[in-house]
Amino acid sequence: MKKIISGGVVRFAFVAVALGVAGTALVAQTSDDKDDPFLWLEEIEGPKALAQVQSWNAETDKIIRAMPDFEQDRARARAILDDEAQIATPDEVMGDRVVNLWRDAKNPRGLWRSTPLDAYLAGKPVWTTLIDVDALGKTEGKSWVWHGADCLAPSYKRCLISVSPGGTDADVVREWDMDSRSFVTDGFVVPEAKSNVAWIDANTLLVGTDYGAGSMTSSGYARILKQWTRGTLLSAAKTVLEGKAEDVSVQGGGTQDGDRRWVFAYRATDFYNSEKYLRAADGRFVRTPVPESADMRDVIGGRMIVFLNKALGSVPAGSLVSYSLPDIAAGKTVQPEPVFTPSKSQAIEDVSATDNVLWVKVLDDVSGKLLALRRDAKGSWSNRAVALAPNATVHLLGGAGKQDVAFATVETMLEPPALMAVSANGTPSKVQSLPARFDASQFKVEQRFAISKDGTRVPYFLVRKKSVTGAVPAIIHAYGGFRAAQTPGYMTGQPYRAGPMGLFWVEDGGAYVLANIRGGGEYGPAWHEAALREKRQNSFDDLHAVAEDLIKAGISIKGKIGISGRSNGGVLVGAAMTQRPDLYGAVISGSPLHDMKRYSKLLAGASWMAEYGDPDVPADWAFMKLYSPYQNVKKGVHYPPVFFYLSTKDDRVHPGHARKLAAKLKDYGQTVYYHEYMEGGHSVGADHAEDAVRAAMLQAFLKRELMGEGK
């Protein structure tokens, strides 16, 4: 496995700004904000704002925790999440060893550990603990949350360890020695900030971080990338690439390709476009010919594998091409070489290279397929399909380079995950599989297609009890943005969709729906672009179409359909609620965006303007104001009850979005449930304890509002 940055922007994850002391301050008002009575709720840790949050939390706790099955559901959710029968996924293969972060009841923040690769492949790992994150936090008096390790290949003796206080995106980076299993005395340390750090060699790093006034972009990412040599002060590091204040970020990255290490730098001019640079032998960074709209995915055999988000000559968007790195480094003119083009029903989702095989995971009508690609001496690429379970969700986890083995998990909504090791000839073998955690024989799963307002076929997955007849309450989860495909997973293990809540809901007789609306990556770049900026309404229409299809098919009825969305999905469910309050009976809004007039001024919001538009540009606000949830809630309209969940420590999406919409709805006499957790960052749960509480709360909310229990 390799460490590499795709196109200079971490895809599918919002970027954010470190809060520090400034996190308690109110963002500056403009003349447009003078009529906003709830602007004070943007003061993240202001005493008045926190007092209001605590009051709302208490109101919700009093109702939800009194529900008959709340404690039973919480305990069961915690047992499921803490169950030691988990897939020990390979976070990285370091030569002949596999490393993994393991979390369970005894280790809620995790054990970073390793095992010999041979033992792992045999299904009999022998784990050695490297870092006990819980013990580290206790010793240092910090609420550390693991953010990962970057170990320098090919020896993997030195690592850059990233930990975050309380789960924020801002973290601390420290150098770790594998042999002594300790942090390096006088080693590299990057203080808490929104940083990106990459190895050049054992004594040199690329560091993008907060270097002081003017060193960060308006999105809160590093604007300046420096080369830092061991034994010198970080403040004295040499600048190698500098962006503009209006850029998203400047970042470094690197990957091991056989015996050679390739080092890159990226200047992300917006969320979807970046200049890509290669470090030459003399230390210069050479601009590559890769289109700014394309994403770098991996390196194999001296060739950079690139995903095209836009057509390049005769090569369609959604395809893979490759470029010769030695030729780029030598200053030669380089032409792209076609690698793979998916069919119309397919989309490339994951790419990972081992020494001689390029592994490509594609979606085919949202089902996963794994391909093994090889390049011959003439530059032609062949591909072989790996025989994995049909109609399943496949996650490509990376591979073991020299062994040319890929690791992938395979699961469905009713079949638990199995970890597969796939050899160079495409033969899979099972490394580990989980036992069933519920009786799947009582359920059925269907993939259905709704027809949206403009005639587009929108797929969705539906889970119900076989014994259910007639219309029942339903919950639809969707996302619809940032090229992020929503693929179905085993019903107990979907933390992004509140963990085992979906299972509990279906067991109680409800219908659970995962909708693949436009804006995601289910069908490649075109599916995303169909809901971009001024076309955002298409994603809302798709969600409405799925709900209407449930009604038309007799699966549910108007007013008994709940909708759930998190992060970008908050925009989705907020807009859907305001546009069709008659259609929906409950709304779950997690870590959401809601005030699209001010989002670009709040934390990392400026980095997402390529997705939504710039509200300060009149032409953009003209289409954004038509759906912005905060601006479209009207007095006198009856809206479905809303459950907001979020974290005070979310330094990605500002908690003011949820707070202000909650306040406005309550001011208009609407029903609001609210749960703001102090830790956890954008993902809300810093550990399984909070994840279990949230799952039980959302289940209780749906039962109360859609099934009428507890009223």
Image (tube, rainbow, N blue to C red):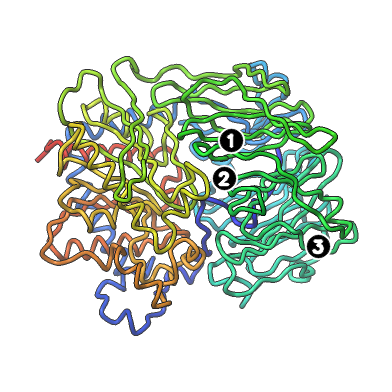
Q: Give the alpha-carbon distance from disc 1 to disc 2, as whole Å.
A: 9 Å
Image disc number at residue 146: 2
Q: What residue type is labelled 3?
A: Val
| Quarter in which the C terminus is drawn | top left
Q: In this view, does 616 lie to the left or right of 54?
A: right
Q: Is mark 3 on a helix, strand or loop?
A: strand
Q: What residue type is labelled 2?
A: Trp
Residues tagged 1 and 2 counted as in contact (Cβ below 8 A): yes
Q: Is residue 155 visible?
A: no
The residue at 43%/54% (across/down) is 530
Q: Residue beneath label 3, please?
A: 286
Residue 87 x %, y %? 54, 26
Number of the front mark, 3 or 1: 3
Q: Is mark 2 on a helix, strand or loop?
A: strand
Q: Is residue 142 left or right of residue 302?
A: left
The residue at 21%/46% (across/down) is 586
Residue placed most toward the observer, 36 or 175: 36
Q: Residue beneath label 1, please?
A: 101
Residue placed most toward the observer, 69 or 270: 270
Ranked by sequence position, the earlier of labels 1 and 2 is 1
Circle 2 packing at 10 Å, graded few (<14), some (14-19), many (20+), is many
